[in-house]
Each structure stands twice: as C-alpha cells, then as structure tokens.
Image (cartoon, rainbow, N blue to C red):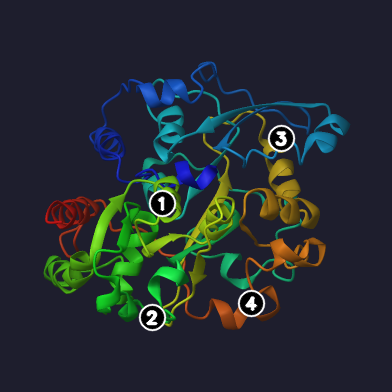
Amino acid sequence: MKHEDHNKKEITSARTADLFNEVMLARRSFMLGTAAIAAGATLGAWVPQARAAVGGNLEVMAWEGYTLETETAEWRKANNITMRAAIMSNQDDVTAKIVGSNAVRLDLAEYSNGYNAIYNELGVLTELDVSKIPNYNKDDIYAPFYEGDMWYWDGKNWAMPWVWGLDTIVVNPELTGFEVKSYEDLLRPELTGKLAFLDNPLTVWPQIAKVTGYGEKFPNLTKDELGDCFEKLKPYRDQTKVFASSNGDVISLFASGEIAACFCVWSAVPLETAKQNVKTVAVYPKEGAAVWADAWFIPKTAENIETAHAFINEALEPEIQASISKTAVAAAVSKKAPALMDAGTKALFDYDNFDQQFKTMKVYGQPPRTSTEFATYDDWLQVWADFRAGF
C-alpha cells in the first residue's frame, strides 16, 4: 500500500535534514544510506549522456503502485522503451540518488508537496518543456494543479503534479455514537481515550494549524505562534489513546476497536477497514481536509530526457489517470478522467462539484529549512516530538 509507506515519517527523517545541511555546506562527497541502497542502488553511476528521441532505457523511481508499469506497458512496447523502476520508501531515497558526487542516473522521479523548495535549493531540478507534455494544459487540468506554486515558479515548470488525495478525519460511527462535522466534535467526552493521531507531518501539521487558528499562516508561523499552536492542541492530546506510525497502524486500531476516530489520516482507510468487516467513514469537516500531491520531475542526472517528457504526458492521459485513481485509491488531475472511472472510484471525490469542494482545501508546503523570521522545519519537528512525548 503506497500511502502506508508514504506516511512513514516521510519528511521527518533526520537523514533529510542531514543531507540538506551537507549540501548547503558544499561538502563534495555524499555516502548513500542503507535506505537508498535498499531502494535500488543497482542504478549505475551517473555519466551525462542525453538522448534525443523517445525510446531506449528509462530509469524511474516512484512510490510502490505508482510506477505505471502496467498502465504504460503497451505504450512502452510501441516506443521500444525499457523501463527500470526503483521503489522509494520515503523521499530521502530519491534525494540520495540525485545529490552529491555519488549521484546516479535517474531519468524520472516523484516528489511530494513540500519538497519543491528543498529540491530548488539543491539545484537538482530540470526545467520541463511543456510543449512536449500536451496533456498538461489549462483546459484539461483542474485549476489547483495547473501551474501551482509547488511545481511552477520563476515562470517555469519544474515538476508535473499527476495524482493527489486527501487525509482527513476518519471515524467509526458505531463507536462515536454521534455525527462528526468538525474537529471540535473530537473533543466531546464520548471520545475521551478513543482518538488517534497519525505521525505524518506532511498532512497533519497543516491540519493542526487550521484547527488552532493558524491555517492561513502555515507554514510560516513565528516561534511564538508555533508554541501557541501546540498549546491550543493540548485538549486533543488529552483525548488521544495512541500516536500511530502509519496508515496501516490506524487501520489495525480501527479493526480491533481500540479507537473510534483518527485526527487526520488517509481518506481511503474506510475501504481497508471494510475488508475486515469494520465500518469507518471519512469525514470532511468544516475546517477542510488536508491535501497530498505527487509530482513527476526530471532530475539533473537524467539522460533520457525526451522519453521522460513523453512518460509524464502519458501519465496525464485520461485513461491512465482513471486507472491509477482506482488502483492507488487516489484522485485525478485530469478533467477528462472522471468520465472514464467506475462509480466507486469516481465517488472518492466529488468531481462534479470540484471547485466548490476544493474551496476549503489547499496544497501546503512545509516550514522553511532556515529562517530568522519564522519557525523552521527543525523547530516544528522538536515541538511535534515534545507534544507526542507529553502524551
């Protein structure tokens, strides 16, 4: 399950901070960690050698279930493309391959929202030639994903969002005994000791900011505002039974009846608990849900750039968008995809009222790595760790 891995402390890893600091200090060497080796260190050392036509070998790294190997099989065969896909367990696996003197060839990879600023500072992104990605156009792509600031800046496209989803409140209605419409409802006495938090800053931190009145400022809160944010969150900690490390843990907790609600978790959890004969419901509260979004980008270590562009365009084909939405339990960025979805997949999001439904949502970045004005990413990590330690 991709978003079980996707949510395993994806951006809380200490190695990410260490890697970032190492590059910023201009150290010339970088040793691949065990996570990177496990994720596919068989990729050879990078020797720049651009290819001018679609075809040949394509080195890809993506989340499990998101490599599009099945969906692009016929297209690759028709274009004589051999794709080798390495699976990323967290974003560090990609970073390790494209940064430093030991960087290796990677023609195409994914990054999650929040990594745009880091990769921009590291200088590892290749500007995309949108003329080679005709499926990416204003008429066919939902507005939040067309030239959004996570992927488009300085008048250039650096990455291409292609799949997204929601994390939100999930409840077991039989155990709650009442309808949950707002985060405030999670503070009702009936839920004392029945709430779970997921340790996933990518989506949980923005929700915390919303709930405590700082949604409009996130991710740029001062240190005082950050402290106040978590002070206001303490009543939710008083309700909490457990801090779960992954979506899979949350699913197990629901299945065993240990929790009645989760503060913010993958909206597809109900599909998984249903397999264990436990009914849960994803709630879209008045405060809105949290959005995660994955984007394709072409690293500086890429060689087969033409094929990488063609692959991104293929990923935006309506048929492929509909397919990945079903298999990965995700949402499409193509306006043409919903018409090709089965009823169950289409029901994952109200595409017919997309603009209205998305009004309370925002694709957030992450706190700055360094700042003299705002609380940094490391400041957030520390306060988040202290908050959990006080449980």
Q: Earlier in the sequence, mark 3 or mark 1?
A: 3
Give SS at disc 2: loop
Which three-letter amino acid code belongs to the residue tagged 3? Glu
Instruction: List x then y, in percent, for residue 226.
Output: 17, 67
Residue 255 visible, this orientation: yes
Q: Nearer the viewer, mark 1 or mark 4?
A: 1
Determine whether 267 is above or below 323 in the image. below
> How would you rate the neighbour count of disc 2 (Cα within 10 Å): few for under 14, some for 14-19, many for 20 or more?
some
Q: Earlier in the sequence, mark 2 or mark 1?
A: 2
The label number, if any, that marks residue 69 in the structure image: 3
Give yes or no for contact between labels 1 and 4 (Cβ–Cβ under 8 Å).
Answer: no
Residue at 68% from the left image edge and 68% from the top image edge:
347
Determine whether 43 is above or below 240 in the image. above
Separation of marks 3 and 1 at Cα, in angstroms? 35 Å
Residue at 25% from the left image edge and 35% from the top image edge:
18
Q: Nearer the viewer, mark 2 or mark 4?
A: 2
Determine whether 203 is above or below 362 in the image. above
Determine whether 365 is above or below 303 in the image. below
Q: Earlier in the sequence, mark 2 or mark 4?
A: 2
Give SS at disc 1: loop
In this view, the residue in front, 225 or 240, is 240
| Mark 1, residue position | 256
Q: Earlier in the sequence, mark 2 or mark 3?
A: 3
Separation of marks 3 and 4 at Cα, in angstroms? 29 Å
Separation of marks 2 and 1 at Cα, in angstroms? 25 Å
In the visual, does 108 lie left or right of 210? right
Instruction: List x then y, in percent, for residue 33.
Output: 34, 23
Which three-letter amino acid code belongs to the residue tagged 4? Phe
Q: Earlier in the sequence, mark 1 or mark 4?
A: 1
| Mark 4, residue position | 354
Which three-letter amino acid code belongs to the residue tagged 2? Ser
| Mark 2, residue position | 182
